[in-house]
């Protein structure tokens, strides 16, 4: 069977040959509606798994702390002047509020709700 990923004249799901139309437009990627639906289901399942791993679970805080522990030490450097350090951190916090709000407005519902809540809580703590 040909490699479905690299063969433009074969279905990207099952590898069966596809008769490409002579007309202009994008080439077909699926041999049938069933293969198209199978690929869509598989894609949705992968997205759902990724969102679930990012959005929640009982060990979310632990995973986030582990990820932060892997950042280079320079990521935590602050100016020597305490006033400048405070201004820098507060400015970064407000940028984070804005970024969280943008994700909440455009992201998937599973992630958007969590981002909106985090943005609201962070903004409230900064006021």
Image (cartoon, rainbow, N blue to C red):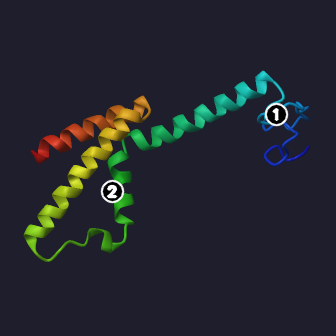
Number of other residues with Cα within 10 Å of mark 2, as a class: few under 14, some 14 to 19, many 20 or more:
few
Residue 50 % position (x, y): 51, 41
Residue 76 % position (x, y): 27, 69
Q: Residue at x 36, y 33 (%)?
A: 105
Q: Earlier in the sequence, mark 2 or mark 1?
A: 1
Residue 111 % position (x, y): 39, 36
Furthest residue to the bottom? Answer: 80
Residue 71 % position (x, y): 37, 67
Q: Residue at x 19, y 57 (%)?
A: 91
Dividing the image into 4 quarters, which one contains the N terminus?
top right
> SS at mark 1?
loop
Q: Which residue is mark 1?
A: 24
> SS at mark 2?
helix
Q: Which residue is mark 2?
A: 65
Q: Quadrant of residue 124?
A: top left
Q: Is residue 21 left or right of residue 58?
A: right
Q: Is residue 7 left or right of residue 52?
A: right
Q: Is residue 34 above or below residue 6?
A: above
């Amino acid at each position: 069977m040909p490699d479905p990923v690299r063969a433009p004249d074969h279905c990207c799901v099952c590898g069966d040959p596809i008769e490409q139309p002579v007309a202009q437009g994008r080439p077909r990627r699926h041999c049938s509606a069933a293969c198209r639906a199978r690929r869509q289901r598989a894609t949705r399942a992968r997205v759902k798994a990724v969102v679930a791993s990012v959005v929640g679970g009982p060990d979310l805080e632990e995973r986030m702390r582990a990820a932060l522990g892997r950042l280079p030490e320079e990521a935590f450097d602050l100016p020597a002047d305490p006033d400048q350090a405070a201004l820098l951190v507060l400015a970064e916090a407000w940028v984070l509020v804005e970024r969280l709000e943008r994700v909440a407005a455009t992201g998937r519902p599973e992630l958007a709700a969590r981002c909106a809540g985090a943005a609201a809580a962070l903004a409230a703590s900064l006021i």
